[in-house]
Structures are given as C-alpha cells and as structure tokens.
Amino acid sequence: MWQDPLFVVIVIAVLLVLVILMVGIGSFAKGGAFHKKHANRIMRYRIAAQAVAVLLVLLFVAVRRMGGN
C-alpha cells in the first residue's frame, strides 16, 4: 500500500487532522488568551482537514473498486 501515492496522501491528511486536534485539545486544557483567540479557528481548520481526509478515503475506495491497483 505504501507504493500507492494516494494512500500516502491519505495518511498525511489523517496525521494533519490529528495534529490539529491535539493543538485544539491542548489549548482547551490550558485555557488562557490563546484559547480564547484561536479556539474557533482551530475547530474550523480541523473540520476542513477532516472533510478533505474523508473525501480522499472515499476517492481511494472508489479507485480500488474500479480496479485501480
């Protein structure tokens, strides 16, 4: 699977979602000015990154079903 470029892009997208989620959770736990200023922006970034990751997974499944190796 690691030879498939689309799979590698999916892994990168999922890791990006994880990083954004961890930054959001960390800022929530710490609180303070950073959280108040950036909480909604971080949430929007996570939702957008998740949407991209889900679409990439769906694309990967569709390509695999059509016979793409």
Image: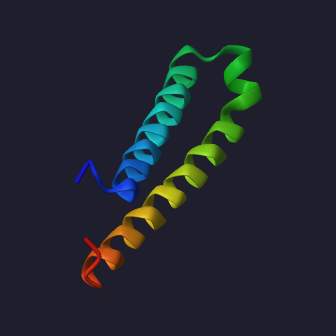
Q: Residue furthest bottom?
A: 66
Q: Residue at x 27, y 75 (%)?
A: 64
The N terminus, quarter of image: bottom left
Residue 63, placed above or below residue 22: below
For image coordinates 43% across by 42% down, the residue present is 12
Is the residue 67 above or below the residue 4 in the image?
below
Image position, residue 43 (x, y; %): 61, 43
Q: Position of residue 35 (x, y in %)?
A: 67, 24
Of 47 and 31, which appears nearest the observer? 47
20 left or right of 44 in image: left
The C terminus - image quarter: bottom left
Residue at figure coordinates x 55%, y 50% from the top left: 49
Question: Where is residue 47 drawn, in percent x and y?
Answer: 57, 52
Task: Identify the residue at image location x=46%, y=47%.
Answer: 13
Residue 31 in the image, given as x and y percentages of width and height: 61, 17
Q: Quadrant of residue 15?
A: top left
**Residue 65 lies in quadrant:** bottom left
In the rendered structure, the answer to whether residue 14 lies left or right of residue 46 reads left
